[in-house]
Amino acid sequence: MKGKPSRSKTSKTSQSKLANKKHNRLAKQGKLKKRKKKDKDQQSQNEDKLQHQNSGKLQSQVKNDSEEEDQLNPEDVEFYGTPGQTSFVSAAQKRKRTYSESGEIYEQEPRKLFAGESRKNMKDLLPIKTKKGIIPQMIEEPNGEASSDIIEIDTIINQEPKPLPQLSNIQLLIQRKHNLNERKKKIALLASDVIENPEENMKKLRELRLMLEECESDAYITVKKLVMLSLMEIFKDIIPGYRIRLLTEKEKEQKMKKETKALQDFEQGLLMNYKGYLEVLEKYCTGKINEQSNRQRRHGVKHIHIPEDASQVIAELAVRCMCEMLSNHPHFNYRNNIIAVLVPLMNKHNTVISDMVCQTSSKVFREDKSGEIVRLINKMVKVRDFRVQRKVLDTFLALKIKEIDTSEDLDENKKKKREFMSRRERKKRKKMANLEHELLETKATEDKKKKVKLHTEIIGAVFLIYFKVLKGYRKSTLLPSVLEGLAKFSHLINIDFFDDLYKVFNELIESEDLTYRESLHVILTAFTILSGQGSALNIDPLKFYTHMYNTLLHVHAGCSSDDLPLVIDCIDCMMNRRKRLISQQRILSYTKRLATLSLQQMPNGTIAFLGLIRNFMLTYKYLDFLFDNDSQGSGIYLPELPEPEHCHAHNTMLWELSSLKSHYHPAIKKYAVHLGKMAPVSGEGQLPLQYKKPPRDLYNEFSTEIDVFNPPVAEKSTFKHKSKKMKMFMQEDISDMVVQVLSSIPD
């Protein structure tokens, strides 16, 4: 009611005092007991009427009761007319209390569930509230059965679950497709929102990440794969170009600007989601996909076992995601954690996973600034007792290390210098060091000293593995990779190890257990050492020259044509870098052997060997012996003799050049003509400028791996030349008959 005053304005006394006054007043008048008795009698009469009378009498009784409600009760008139009683709220409270008391009585009455047989077939209706109390309503059911709305306890307990509707395969497929489309839409919306505004949509990134832990049986595997790939692309886009530092408790409590607070919240949220994403990927990579997470156990999610084939596909995808994160953002947080997960997978029997991790490691090696992968690989090889696959050590070949610190007593020299420096000089030196450090920070470039020190540690760990394999595991599958690595990093080997290495190399060559490729690596390593720091050593590598002379025969245009770059590097190291230390017979025999092999190679290999012969001709003037028919001494040329010093190569000629002049490749023709005229530098027969390149560059330029002929083939001319009639045979009758037969053949 609008005009009803509030309780605080109409009544100055408390409700308890008003109730006590009312109770005392009724007790004095002797009407309280009569009223309670009257209510009980009225209630019992109403129950009897409801049990024995029909529904019509029940309605008339309800009508009479409603009429009585409209008239004022004499008690109410007497109550309202008492002097000093001006509050209407107290009367309303009394009325409400009477109804509530009757409601409590009604609620305490037994229902059909616990009643006797007399009310077994009765149906309860909504009760009617009156001034005198609550009047319950019941009617008798026509069939004598219990109401369907009230379910007994026994039926609830013993009720069997209703069977789900059986769907056909087509219906199940349609339902799965619908659910999958809904999931795809949700993933696309969440991903687009995060990429659009990452700072404000960190909650959506978390929602997308939590979809990895969903267990819907119809689209469980597909949703996982889509979410993993989506998160990978999102993190590749939104990860900053710097490393995020975790805040301390003191920094979190400090006051800061609104923009700074927003940036820190974004960084911490990004780091938290990125860590959760990597944890899920780690679980999938290590084959723990069928383990239920703690979050799923807390929420009571039923775990679904994934088949082995599907788990393998998810594992491969998880490894791919981790490799992408490492290769695209090697500077970001949790980099070492990713490396610790991926390195053991390099030796896995699953070739897809192991090749993927090895390729990623090779890619990271090119920009590695910490050497963490090398340390973990070194540790894994030691733990497995060098029983790892060869491709694990092949990843070291991707390292780009050109300079290391070879000074051993560098720290001791610094300490000695400090002892003889005065206090003033030390102070000045300290200031200069601080100034140089500040200048390096302003340049934003890497300190060269730190870089050299790091490279020294990395190459030390690599050589430690190589030398252990050479010392105790010569028959393992790692030997070819070790020899190839030593050949690449031979210029970084300390001179103190040269004698021991040459002893090992001689033993390997004499054992004749090496393949031709392994022999080439051993020879290249040995001569690289001798051409560098080992030039001061008094070592005669005669055995290596002999072994190389015999190994060349294994290289041809068949399966071994890919090893030609290695052969070119070995010849260049053996001949061109040791010009004054090679005998005349050795040069002549190697030149003749290369000319013989040029007939057995692909065009790029042939022109590379001709380039090596040209370099020999320009360097050694006595090669004109190979263009003279007259013999220069006793004996004849013995090409099958294994010793190049005693094969009498000075008594032979380079007749292979005349055969190469008719080669189908135009570049080889020009090279053969040039060498046939004894490689003139100028004048007639000089080599065109485009072919004056190192042999290795010629090999790469004229390569046929991309299926492109160099130089390009000219288009077929449409001009018809008049062919002259030529006699094919000496007898005219036979020539005419052949022409007649050929002309009768249709085009």
Image (tube, rainbow, N blue to C red):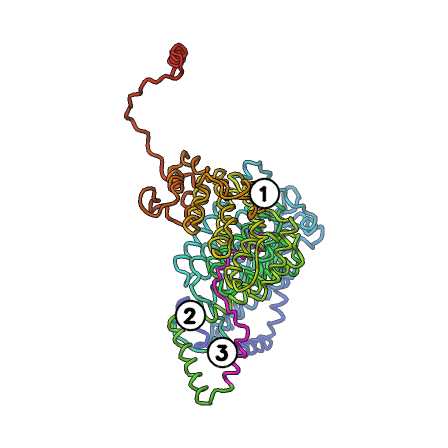
In the picture of the structure, the residue carrying the numbered disc 3 is: 250
Inspect the image, locate mark 2, and give the three-letter code of the amino acid beneath it: Lys
Q: Nearer the viewer, residue 84 or 243?
A: 243
Q: Which residue is mark 2?
A: 4
Q: Amino acid at mark 1?
A: Leu
- The magenta span reads 390-418
Comparing 688 with 444, the one in front is 688
Residue at mark 2 to residue at mark 1: CA–CA distance: 129 Å
Q: Earlier in the sequence, mark 2 or mark 1?
A: 2
The x, y position of residue 105, in whole percent, is 63, 63
* Residue 394: quadrant of the picture: bottom right
Q: Depth check: 733 or 643 in front?
A: 643
Residue depicted at x 52% and y 67%: 456
| Residue 445 coordinates in the image, percent (x, y) | 41, 69
Amino acid tagged 3:
Lys
Nearest to N terminus: mark 2 or mark 3: 2
Q: Earlier in the sequence, mark 1 or mark 3?
A: 3
- Look at the image and tell me whether residue 207 can be seen: no
Q: State which quadrant residue 201 falls in.
A: bottom left
659 w.r.t. 131: above or below: above
> Would you say residue 309 is visible in this rendering?
yes
Residue at numbered disc 1: 641
Q: Quadrant of the N terminus?
A: bottom left
Q: CA distance from mark 1 to mark 3?
A: 82 Å
Taking the magenta stretch, the answer to whether it contains residue 398 is yes
- The x, y position of residue 191, in whole percent, is 44, 54
Pointer 1 local density, CA inside 10 Å: few below 14, some 14–19, many at least 20: few
Q: Main secondary structure of the magenta part?
A: helix
Residue depth check, mark 2 versus mark 3: number of the one nearer the observer? 3
